């Protein structure tokens, strides 16, 4: 494979279109509504019927918004409007003191020592995934997004609630989430109208029903765990850790209703985003056989896949980092201004929407060398590391950086290592077309062929 392998990228729209055309494209897919100039621009202004939005790629401004003055750029109500029926008041959509309290309770569960503790559960999920894929590794076409979703969901259930995906409730939640993510885009046009919660959000009946079904199942899991904690029989997993942690300032723990909101986002973030990242990485390896062979050789070079040995898989980690650069699971983040601002000689009014796009900034033509090329070796260079410090944010940045970022990196490298050690991957059928649903997925799935790897030749 050439060093200039350019994987699939969505087609951009024309630079100038009518508002109606923009809205129509937006409803179809977020990527379809964005012009190509955003891969070169430092800032762009979009005027919509209900507000102005500003698309920011300038690293200095991104740093100001996410790191230097984050309290004046809370998450937009647009995101909450789009996802409220599922996520409620979870840490993903809240702001201010409510959000800070939630993070104080949640963050200790994902500290380094806890990640070592949950590693055996990740390894068990990986072994179950390899066994499941073994029955499909005969050269037939396999839809790998579906398989990646099941792997990621299994990891979440095992690490959060100490149950495998084969558990009845876990399987029901997984099936409902698969249905939900295809019915609900990241944003919807109704969300642009800032209305009270009790006013219907014009979501489809199917979206509302799947949201209600998921929350009912998560409520059952959460109530059962509270009962186990009270009885002293709860396992020492992430759910127990979070549910027994007191806010160090107020001394108050999450209520059962609050915990359901948090479990919903843990599953959404830990399942959807991880599945997206893993599926795209496996596709890149299937197409780039040389890179796949290097990953296989690196994995075969360690005696066992232990927590300590993950640090030896440096190239595998760089492959995953490069996949996250090209296909960040959450393509865009939206903030809202609480005070007047001046960005690049433009006056920004209170209430303006600020769009930060990992998808565009991580492919920006004025920041990255060969931005659309898949090249894991770029991560060995000082130039790339310097660029990444200002223009690489697959997990966001600053105080709102994803609390599970470390979890995701361990999970991603481990799953890649286990799959590539067991199977040789090849593309099957047409190249996938990236679209933005809740996460960056393929329009018609990602189809690969798997065959069992001859470990003696790796």
Image (cartoon, grey):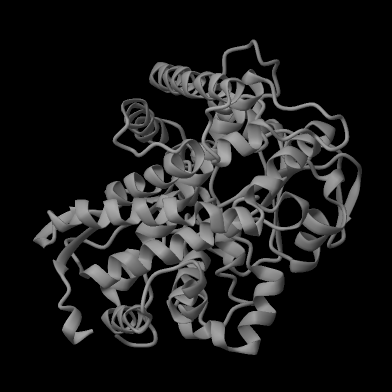
Q: Position of residue 21 (x, y in %)?
A: 49, 40
Viewer-nearest residue: 112 or 374:
112
Q: Residue at x 69, y 81 (%)?
A: 386
Quarter placement of the C terminus? bottom left
Q: Residue at x 48, y 24 (%)?
A: 221
340 versus 27 height, above or below: below
Q: Position of residue 403 (x, y in %)?
A: 65, 50
291 versus 206 height, above or below: below
76 relative position to 71: left or right: left
158 relative position to 175: left or right: right
449 relative position to 55: left or right: left
Q: Position of residue 183 (x, y in %)?
A: 39, 30
Q: Position of residue 249 (x, y in %)?
A: 88, 35
Q: Residue at x 44, y 66 (%)?
A: 413
Viewer-nearest residue: 437 or 279:
279
321 versus 274 height, above or below: below
Q: Is residue 362 visible?
A: yes
């Amino acid at each position: 494979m050439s060093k200039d392998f350019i994987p699939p990228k969505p087609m951009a729209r024309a630079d100038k279109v009518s508002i109606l055309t923009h809205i129509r494209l937006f409803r179809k897919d977020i990527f379809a509504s964005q012009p190509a100039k955003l891969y070169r621009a430092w800032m762009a202004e979009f005027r919509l019927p209900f507000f102005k939005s500003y698309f920011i790629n300038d690293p200095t401004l991104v740093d100001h918004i996410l790191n230097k003055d984050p309290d004046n750029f809370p998450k937009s109500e647009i995101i909450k409007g789009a996802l409220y029926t599922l996520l409620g008041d979870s840490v993903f959509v809240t702001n201010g003191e409510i959000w800070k309290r939630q993070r104080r309770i949640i963050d200790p569960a994902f500290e380094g020592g806890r990640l070592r503790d949950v590693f055996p559960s990740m390894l068990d999920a990986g072994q179950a995934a390899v066994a499941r894929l073994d029955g499909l590794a005969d050269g037939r076409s396999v839809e790998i997004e579906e398989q990646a979703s099941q792997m990621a969901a299994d990891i979440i259930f095992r690490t959060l609630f100490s149950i495998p995906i084969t558990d009845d409730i876990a399987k029901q939640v997984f099936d409902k989430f698969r249905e939900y993510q295809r019915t609900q885009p990241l944003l919807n046009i109704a969300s642009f109208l800032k209305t009270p919660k009790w006013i219907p959000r014009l979501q489809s009946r199917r979206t509302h029903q799947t949201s209600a079904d998921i929350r009912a199942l998560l409520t059952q899991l959460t109530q059962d765990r509270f009962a186990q904690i009270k009885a002293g029989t709860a396992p020492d997993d992430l759910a127990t850790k979070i549910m027994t942690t007191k806010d160090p300032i107020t001394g108050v723990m999450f209520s059962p209703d609050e915990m359901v909101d948090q479990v919903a986002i843990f599953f959404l973030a830990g399942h959807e985003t991880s599945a997206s990242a893993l599926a795209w990485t496996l596709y890149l390896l299937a197409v780039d056989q040389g890179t796949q062979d290097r990953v296989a050789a690196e994995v075969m070079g360690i005696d066992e896949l232990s927590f300590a040995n993950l640090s030896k898989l440096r190239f595998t980690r760089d492959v995953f980092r490069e996949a996250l650069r090209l296909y960040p699971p959450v393509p865009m983040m939206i903030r809202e201004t609480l005070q007047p601002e001046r960005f690049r000689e433009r006056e920004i009014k209170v209430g303006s929407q600020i769009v930060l796009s990992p998808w565009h900034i991580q492919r920006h033509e004025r920041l990255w060398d060969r931005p659309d090329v898949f090249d894991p070796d770029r991560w060995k260079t000082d130039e790339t590391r310097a660029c990444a410090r200002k223009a690489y944010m697959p997990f966001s940045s600053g105080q709102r950086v994803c609390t599970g970022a470390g979890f995701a990196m361990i999970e991603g490298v481990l799953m890649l290592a286990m799959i590539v050690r067991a199977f040789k991957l090849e593309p099957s059928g047409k190249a996938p077309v990236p679209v933005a649903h809740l996460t960056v997925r393929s329009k018609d799935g990602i189809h690969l062929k798997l065959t069992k790897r001859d470990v003696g030749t790796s």
